[in-house]
Amino acid sequence: GRVLGVRAGGFGVAQPCLSPQPTAPARSFQLDYEQDCFRRDGVPFRYISGSIHYARVPRPAWRDRLLKMYMSGLNAVQVYVPWNYHEPLPGVYDFAGDRDVEAFLDLTAELGLLVILRPGPYICAEWEMGGLPAWLLWQSDIVLRSSDPAFLAAVDSWLHVLLPKIKPRLYQNGGNIISVQVENEYGSYYACDYNYLRHLLGSFRALLGGEVLLFTTDGAQAEELRCGTLQGLYATVDFGPGSNLTEVFGAQRSVEPRGPLVNSEYYTGWLDYWGGAHASTSAVQVARGLTDMLRLGANVNMQVAGWGGGHSMGPGGLWGVWVSVGAERTRLVSRRYMFHGGTNFAYWSGADLKAQYKPVTTSYDYDAPLSEAGDPTEKLFAIRTVISQFQPLPVGPMPPATPKYAYGRVDLRKYADLLDVLDVLSPSGPIRSQFPLTFEAIKQTHGFVLYHTQLPHDVPAPAPLSAPPHGVCDRGYVMLQKEYQGTLERDGQSTLPVTGRAGDALDVLLENMGRLSFGANFSDFKGLLGNLSLDSSPLSNWLIYPLAIDAAVQQGWPHAALPQPSSRGRSGPAFYTGTFETPGIAWDTFVKFPGWSKGQLWINGFNLGRYWPRRGPQQTLFVPGSVLRVGCPNNITVLELEGAPPSPFLLFLDQPLLNSTLSPSTWTTG
């Protein structure tokens, strides 16, 4: 029927895009600039999509999550490709196991889902460095996301590996990928380098062909659209609740006079930062908003995307729609809410910079329709019910929640202080330097680096050990004569009082909490970025140990080694170990850290991510059943950074606890 719509000149009533194109190619997905809509095989088409990040979901769970999305009424998924997940070192590529993006895409096709692909090279996504590899920063003066020849050379090498895997899976080539985004919110980046966008457009066209629909996404401000759009890339906008539709779509019309009006990311949710509250939105809000939009005659796209930090958020739920606006179709899509978020395993979570550094939690649950463990929620069923009122759902039941098991209490024992096992963790030995070097300068990507020096003179009375502004990235655990003194923190505590004698050992363990994925728009180097001073005198003569903790743990350490004798207590960086057996089943579970402070957890060599119950809100880590073993012990390794409880143990539960935060006044030791 007739629908209320917005055209560049204002509101009016117009016919929607309905008539087929008799001369359209047999298999095509195209823009119709005459009737301002999208067409699939020449026929007007709407999709209902949701985002899922394969890098945040263990491969054995891919089918379960995708099937639940399909049974929710979705017919498409949106997929990011994180470059740094696949090229850990220059020219070294990994597409095996959990990183087999081709297998993931083939599975979407098998289940009858279309794909909107967002291969970057920058993706944001609350992912470490927005998907860009940290090794780019080995060249310290590189200008990221620009036509800097060093950056373009790296991008070209990557695209020549990735895009040939994508081309046969494009819709017009018989696959299921209907559109491909180039870059991501580039107009929000300071560089505003058109030569860079032209270079990307040329590379994508050369490697994917001339038929694929390529698009950009930017905010609706004039400056963002000025810097983020380019002729040859279909320009879409993103905005949140409360925006003036005439203004924001007028902004899109300023760069795209014809074609569908598109809001690529309608951001109605928020993410979790360490130290903040757990985000939540009611299913009632979600269903009500979705129903209201569909009653306008909308096509629906629960585009539940990744990212774009730095935007103000409004109330509302997870939903997005293609609204027929005049004769034009407008996609209003959710942002900052995933249909299924998953988990930031290992060191993959990113960070924001909003007045201060804000690292993202390990859980990427997002209060999404599918929980972190892949369970259908009240919100999912509310969305599914709304969809069913407007179009048929797939036949069959929604797959159930995955079974969970509370394995209970597992006692741990201290294995060794970190300072006593440097021979294992840093087999290549230390790097000598007059002054501290960054992670990037010593080619350490993630994790931890230890900085060692000695006190240059006696310090009989407490004197300040201090870091310059922005000198500690991101947390520094300070030990004097192997005794833990406290923690220095980026945008937090920058001074500790110390006493000691000349020649006393000073060790600072630096932790990378995740490189900025949006916000500050500069290269986020890690480690000691400036020299530490003792009573205002710079310290020198450093030994710098790059730590390969994950390599050691994956090879069975420390479970295959004898415990180290230790006369020291439970404070400071140390390893703890334990084992447990499953009762004949390997089900998903959640591990709680009663009395622990902050650290990293491995089970059977798999890095489950950072825990930080002292800061919160997240109190449990998700443990996929696929990580566990049946019939033999499961090896637990904990690196506690600040202080373990008197009787260290972990508690395995059958449900998560994501919403408990201590007050900021407790952060001085947290």
Image (cartoon, helix red, strand yellow):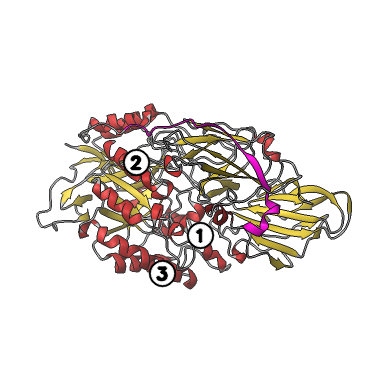
Work out which quarter of the rendered image holds the C terminus and state it.
top right
According to the picture, the residue beneath numbered tag 1 turns out to be: 190
According to the picture, the residue beneath numbered tag 3 turns out to be: 157
Q: Which callout, 2 or 1, points at the residue further toward the start of the chain?
A: 2
Q: Look at label 2 and name its amino acid.
A: Arg
Q: Look at label 3 and name its amino acid.
A: Ser
Marks 3 and 1, Cα distance to the nearest angstrom? 24 Å
Residue at image location 35% in from the left, 68% down from the top: 203
Q: Nearer the viewer, mark 3 or mark 2?
A: 2
Of helix, strand and loop, which one carries label 2? helix
- Label 2 Cα crowd, 10 Å radius (few <14 / some 14-19 / many 20+): many
Q: Which of 618/197 is in front?
A: 618
According to the picture, the residue beneath numbered tag 2 turns out to be: 65
Dots 2 and 1: beta carbons under 8 Å? no
Instruction: Give the image location of residue 111, x and y in percent.
Output: 25, 45
Q: Which callout, 3 or 2, points at the residue further toward the start of the chain?
A: 2
Residue at image location 28% in from the left, 52% down from the top: 106
- Quarter residue 526 falls in: bottom right
